[in-house]
Image (tube, rainbow, N blue to C red):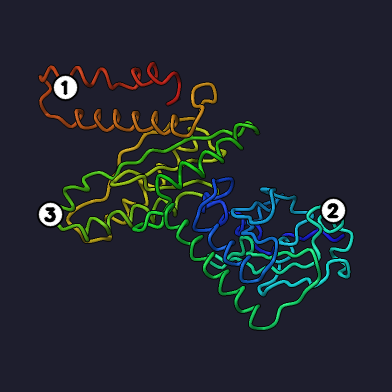
């Protein structure tokens, strides 16, 4: 038996697959309808949408087989994504790659396999495949039909990607961030890797929209998102949560390192503001929250703490700019929102 090799673009391919936030999700009728149609058209006992990650092929939809996944090392689909065309195995017992494969010698007793790579943003994520327990072949018209069906699956996968992306900035949206960041957080927890979360709020967006129109406000959001991507690493998880709120999960980063990211972002925006020629400046408020496993069981809890911290810091900055030093309410709020207060409230999350 020959196990499939990694693809040439394996890191990028896996990153794209994870960005869909589709692995280990529930069945969906839009995919099941396509596998059922494929099964009927080709009159095969098994049809599936298979997605290949590091160690397995996972079935988003599977007709005719009870399993939900199989090891990548024995998968036919792992071989199929190494090429760009349909992989056809007319008789697995006569193929050097598969003749002694446990999926051939045992259940489900594969003899015929045809798999068309599923490509999203130039990355081969898995296959639409058909399986028979007896040898057979496909003619040119049948091969084209399988390709057409695979294109329909690709469109559904692309729609899934759009559902996790912010259309304006191209960053992940809240849904995409929560799914991807939770996976990253679990991995970092197991390996004791430090993590910090930045919660960023683009200041004065309403004023920009009111004074210059929403198109100019959109440009400010896009510029801000671009600068975030520029100062962060590919391994960091970035998102626009909605409106003027953004977040970044910094992987393998301590608080001092997170502060350096903030400094780089400020410098980049200062440079942009000098050259823009606009009568407004892009600025932001932020909170930095260090991940504490004993306190943050989920990414949502970490996000909530960072949001609260950012809000208090923004409120503190507002009152520091207030000229009315005699305002008792402002003085009380300054005391409540002091750094010492933060340290007490967040139990070291800011230190």
- Label 3 element class: helix
- For the point 83% across and 70% down, the residue is 91
Q: What element carries label 1?
A: helix
Residue 53 in picture, x, y percent from top left? 66, 52
Is the C terminus in the top left, top right, bottom left or bottom right quadrant? top left
Residue depicted at 12% across the width and 29% down the height: 323
Q: For residue 278, which quarter of the picture? A: bottom left
According to the image, label 3 marks what residue? Answer: 211
The x and y percentages for residue 214 are 20, 57
Q: Residues within 10 Å of mark 2 (few under 14, many from 20)?
A: few
Q: Are marks 1 and 3 in contact (CB under 8 Å)?
A: no
**Upstream in sequence: badge 2 or badge 1:** 2
Above or below, 50 against 314 in this view is: below
Label 1: which residue? Answer: 330
Q: Which residue is drawn at 53% across and 58% down?
A: 31
Quadrant including the N terminus: bottom right
Tell which circle, 1 or 3, labels the residue nearer the N-terminal end: 3
* Above or below: residue 171 compared with residue 117: above
Give the alpha-carbon distance from disc 2 to disc 1, as whole Å.
Answer: 75 Å
In front: mark 2 or mark 3?
2
Residue situated in front as seen by the camera: 331 or 141: 141
What is the CA distance from the residue labelled 1 to the residue labelled 3?
Answer: 28 Å
Disc on res. 106: 2
């Amino acid at each position: 038996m020959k196990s499939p090799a990694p693809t040439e673009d394996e890191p990028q391919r896996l990153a794209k697959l994870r960005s869909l936030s589709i692995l280990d999700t529930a069945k969906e009728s839009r995919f099941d309808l396509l596998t059922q149609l494929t099964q009927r058209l080709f009159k095969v006992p098994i049809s599936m949408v298979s997605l290949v990650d590091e160690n397995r092929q996972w079935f988003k939809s599977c007709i005719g087989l009870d399993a939900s996944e199989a090891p990548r090392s024995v998968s036919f689909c792992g071989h199929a994504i190494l090429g760009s065309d349909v992989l056809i195995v007319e008789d697995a017992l006569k193929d050097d790659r598969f003749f002694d494969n446990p999926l051939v010698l045992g259940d489900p007793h594969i003899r015929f396999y045809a798999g068309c790579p599923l490509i999203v943003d130039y990355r081969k994520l898995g296959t639409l495949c058909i399986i028979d327990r007896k040898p057979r072949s496909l003619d040119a018209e049948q091969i084209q039909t399988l390709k057409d069906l695979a294109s329909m699956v690709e469109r559904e996968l692309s729609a899934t990607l759009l559902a996790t992306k912010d259309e304006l900035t191209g960053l992940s949206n809240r849904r995409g961030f929560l799914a991807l960041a939770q996976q990253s957080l679990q991995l970092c927890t197991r390996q004791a890797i430090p993590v910090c979360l930045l919660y960023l709020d683009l200041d004065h967006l309403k004023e920009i929209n009111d004074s210059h129109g929403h198109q100019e406000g959109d440009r400010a959001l896009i510029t801000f998102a671009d600068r975030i991507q520029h100062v962060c690493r590919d391994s960091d998880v970035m998102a626009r949560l909605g409106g003027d709120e953004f977040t970044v999960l910094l992987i393998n980063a301590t608080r001092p390192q997170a502060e350096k990211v903030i400094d780089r972002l400020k410098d980049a925006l200062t440079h942009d503001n000098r050259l823009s020629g606009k009568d407004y400046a892009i600025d932001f408020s932020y909170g930095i929250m260090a991940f504490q496993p004993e306190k943050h069981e989920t990414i949502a809890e970490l996000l909530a703490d960072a949001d609260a911290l950012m809000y208090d810091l923004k409120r503190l900055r507002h009152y520091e700019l207030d000229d009315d030093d005699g305002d008792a309410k402002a003085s009380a709020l300054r005391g409540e929102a002091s750094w010492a207060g933060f340290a007490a409230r967040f139990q070291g999350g800011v230190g």
